[in-house]
Image (cartoon, rainbow, N blue to C red):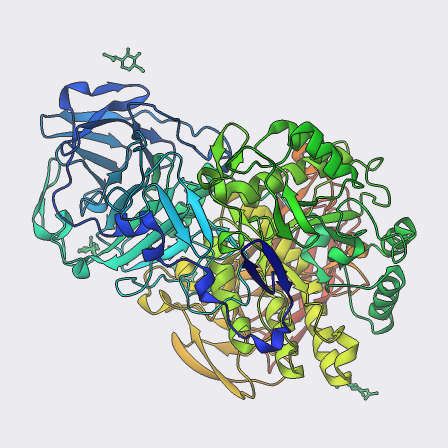
Amino acid sequence: MGVNYIIFNHFILIFFFISLYHINAVDRSKFKTCDQSGFCKRLRASKPELSPFKIIRNSINVSSIGVEGSLVNADTEDFYSFLLQFLEDNTIRLRINENKIIRHRYQPLKALISEPYQHPFETIELLDDYLFFKIGSIKVKFIVSPLKLEIYNKDDLVIVANDLGKFVFEHYRPKPETINEENNKNGEWEERFHEHIDAKRFGPMAVGMDFSFPGATNIYGLPSHADSVSLKTTGNTDPYRLYNTDIFEYELNERMALYGAVPVIQAHGLNQTVGLFWLNAAETWVNVQKLSESGFNSNVMEKIVNLVAGGTKLVQNSGMNTHFMSETGILDVFFMCGPSFYDVTRQYSRLTGAAPLPPYFSLGYHQSRWNYNDQDDVKTVAENFDKYDIPLDVIWLDIEYTHDKKYFTWDPLKFNDPESMVHGLAAKGRKLVIIIDPHIKRDFGYFLHNDATHRGFYVKNKDGNDYEGWCWPGSSSYLDFLNPEVNEYYSSRYLLENFKGTSEDVHIWNDMNEPSVFNGPEVTMPKDCIHHGDWEHRDIHNIYGLFYVMATYDGLLKRSGGKKRPFILSRSFFSGTQRYAAIWTGDNMAEWGHLKMSIPMCLSSALGGISFCGADVGGFFGNPDKQLFSRWYQTGVYLPFYRAHSHIDTKRREPWLMGNETMHLIRNAIRERQSLMPLYYTLFYEHMQTGAPVIRPLVMEFPKEKETFDIDDQLLLGKSLLIKPVVEADVTHVDVYFPGANEIWYNKYTYQQVKTNGVKTIKISQNEIPVYIRGGSIIPIRNRIRRSSALTLHDPFTLIVALDINGTASGQLYLDDGESFEYRNGKYLLLHFTFLNNQLMSKIVDDGRFKTKAWIEKIIIIGIPNMFRTGIINSDRGQEELEAKYNTDEYSLTIRKPGVSVAVEWSISLL
Ligand SMILES: *[C@@H]1O[C@H](CO)[C@@H](O)[C@H](O)[C@H]1NC(C)=O
Ligand SMILES: *[C@@H]1O[C@H](CO)[C@@H](O)[C@H](O)[C@H]1NC(C)=O
Ligand SMILES: *[C@@H]1O[C@H](CO)[C@@H](O)[C@H](O)[C@H]1NC(C)=O
Ligand SMILES: *[C@@H]1O[C@H](CO)[C@@H](O)[C@H](O)[C@H]1NC(C)=O
């Protein structure tokens, strides 16, 4: 949840809650434009002219570590060192730092899962003008003057670093005696924004570079923005901004910063996809433009490229350029050379990690509200889900459950018996999620504030005193998670003996961790605040929220002795957050536009490595009408995190309060979700293994089909379900784009086939949104709907076998206990299904040490032209005959009760 409205007036803090119905858009003046952000203004203005940076040729040392050496800014005579490294899996890393270390620069290495592995490379040529290296099919030309890096895949030039010569590295310098208009033209030493003055102890220290992608037509990535998946060019607008902030009622189709920052992009063209990861946790802006509009003859455009190995080649007048600008930090950039889209997402996940398997329940339906009033309210809500026969996995408690917004405490009146409440939920396989935020109420009756004060655990202001800001509890200070002692202390708060009333069935929501400071500059912490290690807040801002969820994760692990998988929802995120937490799109609104925007926002997050994403179903602010509400539930089924949530000023909106008809639509949606959980779980397993996102834009699966490049009002769940959410009121038809020239798409409800490659208008009802199964896939679902997903653990499966034009299909099913880490000891089952030559086979891919009673209760084969009547099943029980029923309208064949265990291998031949 976010701040409503705050005015900071000299020394008096006035805290207004203005009814949300009076404001319907973000107050833009509270957030900086590029021109108001000194370094962005300075760096954006860097002229596309010859870069003054040159490599000092005789400093170069080529060793097994990589290529090291020095470079100089010929204008200022400042020296820098560089390190170029070749990593496994077609990835290259370039680091540049200052030589003269007045002060260290922050490197957000916690974003990386580990130190990346190096890979042997070949040196092809070391000439005076350039150095030439090879690693697999990738060639790298490192040009001495001006500094430039060209990366080729085979003989195609795919990335050029410093192509337009926009590399800037502001070196640390002594502070002038007086700060005046001359030395502070663009906020070099002091920056004022409204009443806030940012004292820049260390002066200007920004880092920027431009990167061209000659073969690319589209750039994706840079979550989080309320914008299209394919990034827009920013010639006439502000650049995309990455600066984690608590933004109130954010606007759509905007490049403004939101809650999360993932500085990774994918550059895609017809021939290949490459990626770039800019590892920097400071405020960052990114310009995106077409090379043809750059106003400069880039290396890519101007000439015939001489290829040492491949002769000459004319490079077309196309391609994209991005300009990354960060306020501080070193230059640390990873080039992920693809060449396919899936290669790039895998390469990125090798650097920053993939999400570990989430606990099974967390893929189910979550019911939240700010706030459920008391423990009886929670009990009644849960009972009503049973009464109305709607599955429910989790109930959530927002800040009001605490005693006066003091985290790790319960309101002594409203929640005087949390144990019973949690036990009541757990008895039906349900969980509780409660909120814990990083701001701490400054109240000397509060143990946490006392401990933090006495042990020096708070972030300091620029004068070295505990920083005080304003947040939900009023005057608050903020735990400094850069300090390992703070993490140790904080994570221990989650031990069951420390946090009374909780159990292993209680999971955590970390909100406001940008961090949100209601009276701070841009609703966050002043950049001149000081963290452990003498880092300024500006150095680490975008990674603060990640540090926070890491500590929470550690706490939940400790609580169960490392046995149970934690579930955490985080609002703020950075590269690497996927290893610890799910995210959501923050404080959205009950408007159709926000429903629509939830799809590109989560697709972008998924491309940024964070697949576990959703949007507040129904919209956080405002009251959705029935139609919007049910459409939102129908859409939410197909985003990985499925939670309804709403603001304290909104009307209650549990499904049964919306009238019988709407309640039925919602019930169907949530049941649909529960039935799809085996598919989701399998996709999360695949994500963990390969880094492939759980939800995908169409371009990932159809990278050579130009029409897909800009589509983000449709999505793919895995590669087998195509979804077109209905995001407008009163529509009876929607246009669906069907990708793939040789694909068959089957309506999920009627099995009707679509063989069109292109747009087809589809008639819709209120009951469902268009969902199509891709021919060639086998989808595992569970059709027995229960009160919670925990109760389905040993339930049987139904397989939907959707045939492609060749009459074949394949798919996987992953299962385990759904809550422990025993899968890491081999206690899981991975099945591979194939349908070929009228035979369906189930093979156990792994040794299957997970014991389950689950079995196959039904198989539906769709798109099958032959009227088979019988199937012969071969399994551990020998050969048996099965009855098959053919439906001539649907071209579907249903085999009921094959009755075979999933833990054995079997095959069914159709006769
Ligand atoms: C080159 O780098 C290697 C590895 O860091 C180092 O051992 C060696 O001393 C360096 N050689 C020179 C000439 O600096
Ligand atoms: C794509 O590859 C084809 C075949 O190699 C080549 O002719 C074409 O120029 C390439 N296009 C781009 C944009 O690189
Ligand atoms: C509620 O709606 C469902 C589905 O529209 C319908 O089948 C049922 O009869 C309705 N019940 C009542 C009490 O109106
Ligand atoms: C069908 O088979 C042909 C020939 O083996 C293959 O090239 C094609 O990719 C297959 N089509 C599909 C949709 O799998």
Residue 563 appears in the picture as rendered: no
Q: Is residue 135 above or below residue 362?
A: above
In the image, 885 versus 538, the foreground residue is: 538
x%, y% of residue 464? Answer: 55, 32
Tally of marks: 0
Q: Residue drawn at (75%, 35%), measured in percent from left and top?
A: 450
Residue 828 at least partly seen: yes
Q: Quadrant of the C terminus?
A: bottom right
Q: Position of residue 612 (x, y in %)?
A: 58, 53
Q: Compare residues 268 and 888 and report the one nearer the observer.
A: 268
Residue 51 at x, y percent in the picture: 15, 40
Q: Residue at x 35, y 34 (%)?
A: 330
Report the image quarter containing ligand 1: top left
712 to 529, vertically: above or below: below
Rendered-image quadrant of the N terminus: bottom right
Which of 156 and 220 lies nearest the eye of the viewer? Answer: 220
Q: Residue at x 49, y 62 (%)?
A: 601
Percent position (x, y) of residue 376? 90, 63
Q: Is residue 299 left or right of residue 670?
A: left
Q: Is residue 513 left or right of residue 737?
A: right
Q: Is residue 372 above or below residue 432?
A: below
At a point 35% along the width and 38% down the height, the residue shown is 334
Name the quadrant containing residue 888.
Answer: bottom right
